[in-house]
Image (tube, rainbow, N blue to C red):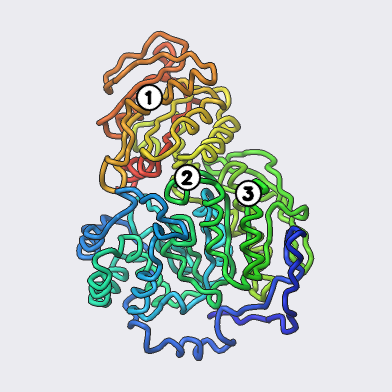
Amino acid sequence: MLKTFSLHQNSRPLSLPSPQVPMLYPPNLLRPFSLHFGTNVTKYRALFTQLRLPRLCSAMAGGGDDMAEMPELMDYLERLKNYERIGVPRGAGTESDDGFDLGRMRRLLGRLGDPHTHFKSIHIAGTKGKGSVAAFISNILRKEGYKVGTYTSPHLLTIRERISIGREGKPVPANLLSNLFQQVKGKIDDSVASENGTLSHFEVFTALAFLVFSHEMVDVAVVEAGLGGARDATNVIRSSELALSIITSIGKEHLEALGGSLQSIAMAKSGIIKEGRPVVIGGPLEPDIELIIRERAQLLDSPVLSTCHPGVNCSLKQYQVDYERPVQICDIGIKMQNDMEIDLRGLKLQMLGNHQLRNAVMATCAALCLRNQGLIISNESIRAGLEQTCLQGRMQFLTKREASAIGADNISLLIDGAHTEASAKGLSEVIKAVHQDYPLALVVAMASDKDHFSFAKQLLSGRKPDVVLLTEVTIAGGKSRSISALDLKDVWIKAAQDVGIDIFDLGVISPEVEVPNTSRPVFAVCSNTPIINIITVALKLIQTGGKRDDSGLVCVTGSLHLVSSLLSVLHF
């Protein structure tokens, strides 16, 4: 049964500070909102009766082969332009003539009955942390009993992971997604034709996600922007449907697509801010970058809640092992006016690293902001939601059973889709804290458009690896976006020289490689080899004197696509 809300009836118009005064948080977090128009849920749903599709099945999860389970949908998507595969054009995410045309997304949704207007949304943009914050806030709301839809990208094993629904947060069932597609295929065909074939894979799938959320009658949708914000296909959410926006961080990823500077990236991501709706911002941000976001918010009368406010405090106390996997023990304390306060001591986060603690703080601030507007969200639900959140392929230590299934007995195996300098820093911190003095092997593959040198330098500046194996990975169905292993090794050698590490270059190797007699870190290329065999090589190379060290660590990183290739072996 859906909840009703006790709303604040005496909210006053927001009085914004002058432009010279930094707006750290609002004096009153704006007008309250309800997830439904009034407390009569039946009446709310009736508003959209004519727009809704008939219910097809309950929202239950499942894994499997997308092409086998949803052949017509996958074949259709394959014929659309896929920027994840071919790369995003210069300036595509900017408010300019080069930017993506949001008009075609609105026209497509209009043909489908504007499903994105049938529920409240939380919209998240940012260079890093979007997926983690989305997972945290989604689980907080689920723990309170709300029916939540979550839209994120990319996926690891099945495209259905991008759309999670229900109180369990499982991937959308294949039959539900496929049947919905069949019912609206004619309308999508009309849109593709009227737009002269310019509708993209991401735009059509985003529209299907909104359709699923409407069909499943979610209470709240948590929507992650794909690229930037202003011209992203998800940025069709209007202020009337927006609960709040979250901007997690500003970094240099997709630099050319977002205008070529951090300032232009900040402008693009601040495009998700809507008139009169609050925005939570992470940080710390450079002053000029934060000013861009705050000026946009002030222009739109949108209150700003910063996680760097003096009333927001957090600390990482220690790591410990629970049920074979490390957790970090943290404290989060928030105390602001308007009863926005919480004290979470001894919090056990499965999401590891200081960066994940910051993401947890962002989600907590978002939850308090929603509570301030009238939603029922208990402190217990916030704690439970944070503690029970984990994401595959993000700082994930495999269990002994999982590691044994791929032949990695008696050793720790860590997989993390880090691919930026900032995420490499977070990974390096976790490795140093959890496995400081034991043999370490890194298995790395990356997309061609990443900052390979900064990524390598960051990992080499922390816990010095004993082995680095460079390989290649298929990205979104092709290798054209993957940097060659040989080129990647050259970058890592230069980065090692830059931090003063003398390495042993083993060249191009095969699984039958002999362990060299050297105390220097070993760099090697191991391409055109299944990921299982590469891990076997890594294990072999961190042997010392022919005897395996039971406390060694193999870390697979650099690309979520590489992580996906390993997880697919475990799951299928």
In the visual, does 273 lie left or right of 154?
right
On screen, 78 above or below 218? above
Residue 369: x, y in percent? 66, 67
| Quadrant in the rendering for residue 509 | top left
On screen, 515 above or below 110? above
Q: Which residue is mark 3?
A: 358
How far separated are the C-alphas under marks 1 and 2? 21 Å
Task: Please report contact status of discs 1 and 2: CB closer than 8 Å, yes or no.
Answer: no
What count of labels does the image hold? Answer: 3
In the visual, does 36 lie left or right of 105?
right
Q: Residue at x 40, y 60 (%)?
A: 97
Pick the residue in front: 502 or 412: 502
Badge nearest the viewer, 3 or 1: 1
> Which SS class for mark 2?
loop
Q: Residue at x 37, y 85 (%)?
A: 51
Circle nearer the N terminus (3, 2): 2
Q: Residue furthest top?
A: 517
| Quadrant in the rendering for residue 199 | bottom left
Amino acid carrying label 2: it is: Glu
